[in-house]
Image: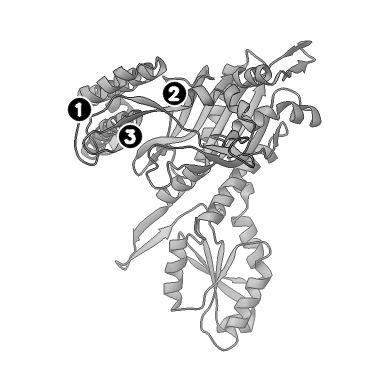
Amino acid sequence: MDKTGSPSKKNIRDYWWKSMVQLNENIVGIDAAIFMHPTTWKASGHVDAFNDPLIDNKDSKKRYRADVLIEDYVAKIENKIKKEVTKAAKRFGDAFDKEQFLSANPRVVEYQTKAESILKRMGQSLEKEDLADVKSLIEELEIACPETGSRNWTDVKQFNLMFGTKLGASADTAMDLYLRPETAQGIFVNFLNVQKSGRMKLPFGIAQTGKAFRNEIVARQFIFRMREFEQMEMQFFIPPGTQKEWYKYWKEKRLKWHQSLGLGNDNYRFHDHDKLAHYADAATDIEFNFPFGFKELEGIHSRTDFDLGNHEKFAGKKLQYFDPERNENYVPYVVETSIGLDRIFLALFSKSLQEETLEDGSTRTVLKLPPVMAPTQLAVFPLVKKDGLPEIARKIVEDLKWDFAVAYDEKDAVGRRYRRQDALGTPFCITIDHQTSEDQTVTVRNRDTMAQERIAVDAIGELLKEKLSFSELLKKL
């Protein structure tokens, strides 16, 4: 990540942490280890069941995930639906009813039915581990190698996604270890420590952010699918039998969090799983409309008592909670929210980067990130590099840098400097001119509206606090 991406990722992470931990008295944060005892991954099911279906093309020698090939085929069908909607919207204008069109137009209904049946069949086949039928589906749909167009496929095989490594001074005595494929298990093995030391009562959650590692068959689509990535996860521990209501609660809560970023509510949708993971009794993805179609942004899973129950069995140590209201000990159930930080960054970046045509016919590239997510919050320009203006500008930077991410730029004409900061997503620029020396005022320019106003130097800090505070976003939740 460069100087734009890294600060933006930090801001996203901070927003998630504040909304999850700071605003919820019953959710606490931890930072668990990346390396854990290998039995951890046996207990979690990752050694035996953390697989992706792999298929090779015999002619191109390229390797693909079979389920992704099928999902990409379905995405093309969804694009056809989108085109039909766009055409109809133009034809009918203000009278267009999208919902009615989707449910009544014969061609669209046919597309939708086909897409749903393909995904349902794939989900059922993967759940039954009927890999032969997955291959049959690929052949029936005449899915070809994206690079060569060849349809000469191998059988589908399962491929374990964990990275293995060794711990020890010599090969003879070394222990097999794994880089963690998810951060969740570090939460589960620390459940009792957190519950007892924090005197937490159910329901309560444990949150953490951190790196995870997966031996992806094909890392692709820029930073959407990577072998090393960062997760933001929260495991919410609840009494057995209450999972349905809490699953519904966190679905709504997490969707609202995403929508608060202002990327357009139509760009989000839920995708309920037909194929459930080995630990889940319900699962859904919040999908986002990336440039390459709707893809998973966050997963919400009702994990039952699988994790704590299995760790209890493998560790030989009870991981139970005494419920004073029920007057009994039990293994809590869990509802999980798990989001990829890199994917959120990609979603923000892809929707915020825009080309605009201005009134004079010229164009500008502008990164319209939510102001609190911007890597640089304020840019300070002296109008010219003389007459003491750079010194005044530097003094303003020195005063503000303690509370805000501030950049100083004196190169090129002011218009070019504005364009440069627009492309970097900087929400505010201030220009120091000769009038500043006389009355201690500066020109503040807004990135989105390009409007300019004159304010006192002493008022800059208050303006930024008002416009760049996380509290305004958090209040939407």
Residue corresponding to mark 2: 272
Residue corresponding to mark 3: 64
Residue 302 position, x and y percent, is 56, 21
Comes first in the chain, label 3 or label 2: 3
Comes first in the chain, label 1 or label 2: 1
Residue 275 position, x and y percent, is 42, 20
Of residues 420 and 10, which is closer to you in this image? 10
Q: From mark 1 to mark 2, how far is it between C-alphas? A: 26 Å
Q: Residue furthest front?
A: 172
Q: Residue 401 carries which label?
A: none
Which quarter of the picture shows residue 129?
A: top left
Comes first in the chain, label 3 or label 1: 3
Which residue shows up at 52% across the image and 74% down it?
409
The amino acid pointed to by label 1 is Glu
How many numbered circles are shown?
3
Which quarter of the picture shows residue 168?
A: top right
Q: How crowded is mark 3: few (under 14 residues within 10 Å), some or many (20 or more)?
A: many
The answer to whether residue 64 of the structure is visible from this angle is: yes
Of residues 208 and 454, which is closer to you in this image? 208
Q: What element carries label 2?
A: strand
Query: In the image, 150: left or right of 99?
Result: left
Foreground tag (3 vs 1): 3
The amino acid pointed to by label 2 is Asp
Q: Is mark 3 on a helix, strand or loop?
A: strand
Residue corresponding to mark 1: 142
Q: Mark 3 and 1 residues: CB-CB less than 8 Å, in contact?
A: no
Which quarter of the picture shows residue 371?
A: bottom right
The amino acid pointed to by label 3 is Tyr
Q: From mark 3 to mark 2, how far is it between C-alphas? A: 24 Å
